[in-house]
């Protein structure tokens, strides 16, 4: 049973990493030069990947 717990932790950590990347990107200066629609597209793409990793 211990093996499945470690695998679950790995999956959660990958999702958490991506979430932190998304937050970091939103706080960065790179985001300032983008149009609202570009930010939405980036969030949509990364959001789907985040959901995939959570599931």
Image: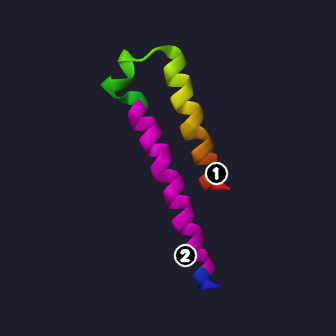
Whether residue 43 sits left or right of residue 32 in the image: it is right
Residue at the image position 51 percent from the left and 30 percent from the top = 42
Which corner quadrant holds the C terminus? bottom right
Q: Is residue 5 magenta?
A: yes
Label 1 and label 2: CA atoms lie apart by 19 Å
Q: Name the one closer to the observer, 49 or 19.
A: 49
The image shows residue 30 at horizontal and vertical percentages of 33, 25
Whether residue 35 sits left or right of residue 33 in the image: it is right
What residue does disc 1 label? 52
Circle 1 — which element? helix
Circle 2 — which element? helix
The image shows residue 40 at horizontal and vertical percentages of 56, 24
Q: Is residue 16 magenta?
A: yes
Main secondary structure type of the part rendered in magenta:
helix
Crowding at mark 1 (Cα within 10 Å: few <14, some 14-19, many 20+) = few
Q: Do the residues bearing badges 1 and 2 touch, measured as CB atoms within 8 Å?
A: no
What residue does disc 2 label? 6
Over which residues does the magenta segment extend?
4-25
Image height of 6 relative to 24, above or below: below
The image shows residue 6 at horizontal and vertical percentages of 55, 75
Q: Name the one closer to the observer, 41 or 21.
A: 41
Question: Could you tell which of marks 1 and 2 lies nearer the N-terminus?
Answer: 2
Which corner quadrant holds the N terminus? bottom right
């Amino acid at each position: 049973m211990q093996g499945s717990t470690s695998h679950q932790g790995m999956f959660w950590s990958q999702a958490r990493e991506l979430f932190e990347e998304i937050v970091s990107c939103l706080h960065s200066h790179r985001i300032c030069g983008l149009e609202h629609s570009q930010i939405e597209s980036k969030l949509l793409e990364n959001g789907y990947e985040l959901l995939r990793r959570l599931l």
